[in-house]
Image (cartoon, coloured by chain):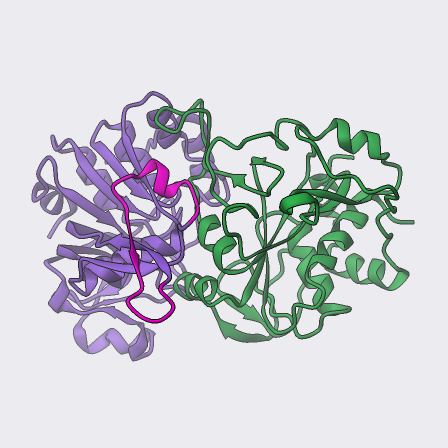
Amino acid sequence: MTAEQVAATLESGMTVGIGGWGSRRKPMALVRAVLGTSVRDLTVISYGGPDVGLLCAAGKVRRVVAPFVTLDTIPLEPNFRRARQAGQIAFTEYDEGMFMFGLLAAAHRLPFLPTRAGMGSDVLRVNPELRTVRSPYGDGEELVAVPALTMDVALVHLNRADARGNAQYLGPDPYLDDLYAKAAARCYVSCERLVDTADLLKEGPVQSLLISRSMVAGVVEAPGGAGFTSCEPDYGRDEERQRRYAETGSDEHQG
Amino acid sequence: MSTRADVCVVACAEAFRGDGEILAAGIGGAVTVLAARLARLTFEPDLLTHDGGCLLTGDVPPLGRPPEVVEGWLPFRDHLWLVLNGRRHVMLGASQIDRHGNTNISCIGDWARPKAQLLGVRGAPGNTRCDPTSYWIPRHGPRVFVPQVDLVSGLGTDRGAAELRRVVTNLAVLDFAGPDGTMRLVSVHPGVSVADVVAATGFELAVPGEVPVTREPTAGELRVLDRLDPGRAREREVAA
């Protein structure tokens, strides 16, 4: 598939999960393709970085669900800030660990999972739809019932994949990309390089095969497809390009 | 001869004293990362430290340098596990903090339409609920030390924090042994008066009759710091 073909499967009002973390291994080629469509009113679920910022700036977003939006080496994301401060988007705020439990719940097709993270904080005040649950065991502890972060579509970027959708990370951190794939009705993978299935174990051990084709609806070969975010070991973050993005709020390399 | 930054790093390192075999995590910048590494290389050798990415380091490299020895793998998902498991002591930052240690890193102003959108709550709710937490605040002033934070990201002593250990600033060391778990002045850094700290704090601070001066680094600690931070990145982070 091409990135444009993936983007064309999105519809206004959908819930879209985006893999990576902050400004690390974001599926930027797929996100840029979404910018070129007419879809609107997306709910975006993300450990947010410039993916969230670009979609907000393009007016594609109704709601952001995230524990943070950051460019990592540059702490604050300019387009997300602007959209929030202008009241243009809704925001569902989560603790990082709570958020993972939402992904785990969706991946396991559970309605929720309990966690301590979030109890006592204002996350429950600003998201009054969040519920708590009491442990049915002797401890009787009250916990946050994190609802499943179920998605219509997930977009992730990995280092290698075969044409059927078996996808491999070669960097040091898988982030939570396999959970996005499992939490979504459809997951699309972009990769730095498409390889034959027989070659998947040439560059990494079997444990690096993070996502199975059974969870993947389509694969896009997109060299540099995470740029300007990092995609180790293929490339690090393009700090100069990121700095220009942070200053201008626009990404001249889009498209 | 030690600088204010040296005093701050040692005061932050002291927060990890007695922690044993848990992860000592500094968040961003030089001072908290140096503090964890200094503690491990001196009085708290069992501490685990990481490289700022996903490696647990077997050796203790200088700032910005990769480890030569790796003793473990800690990708983000395991970091989130570690928080719930309670084997982590993190030294966080805060844009606002109140007298009970409630902190805000999410936004300034009304949450529905903030004056300034910051990071979001990140991991602060879970960290403070499940693990010992300390704070490093490089600019001690009334805009940070406020009567009430705009959004509680990290929990204070009145909201079920697991354990707030200490707050280190460019002026002083504070803890939460004041009345009803409120902030108390523990020591003032060399050259700082109690009145300076009180004036820079936007709420009523518990101040004991005798306030000692924060200890200065030993010659041995200064040698370790020179090896860990030869470029003295710590100086650029500390407002005198």
Q: Nearer the viewer, residue A248 or B71?
A: B71
Quarter of the image holding residue A29?
top left
**Residue A96 can be seen, yes or no:** yes
Using residue B108 as the reference point, say whether residue B58 is left or right of it.
right
Residue A26 picture location, percent across and down: 32, 49
Q: Position of residue A109 (x, y in %)?
A: 15, 62
The hue used for chain B is green
What residue is rendered at 29% in x and 28% in y? A57
- Residue shown at 69%/41% (left/top)? B237
Residue A127 within the magenta-colored segment of the rendering: yes
Above-or-below relation of A188 to A227: below
In this orientation, which residue lies closer to the viewer: B16 or A138?
A138
Q: Which residue is at the far right? A: B1
**Between residues B145 and A51, which one lies in front from this camera angle?**
B145
The residue sitting at 9% across, 45% down in the picture is A5
Percent of width and height locating residue A166: 18, 68
Q: Is residue A149 above or below residue B208?
A: below
Q: How many marks?
A: 0
Look at the image and tell me whether residue A49 can be seen.
no
Please indicate whether residue B132 sits to the left or right of residue A207 in the image.
right
Query: Is residue A22 rendered magenta in the image?
Result: no
Q: Where's the C terminus of chain B, which quadrant?
A: top right
Chain coloured purple here = A
Per the picture, the main secondary structure of the magenta-coloured stretch is loop
Report which quarter residue A252 is drawn in: top left
Q: Position of residue A175 (x, y in %)?
A: 35, 60
Q: Does B135 sit above or below residue B198?
A: below
Q: Where are the magenta residues, as a range?
A: A120-140
* Side of A245 relative to A186 (left or right): right
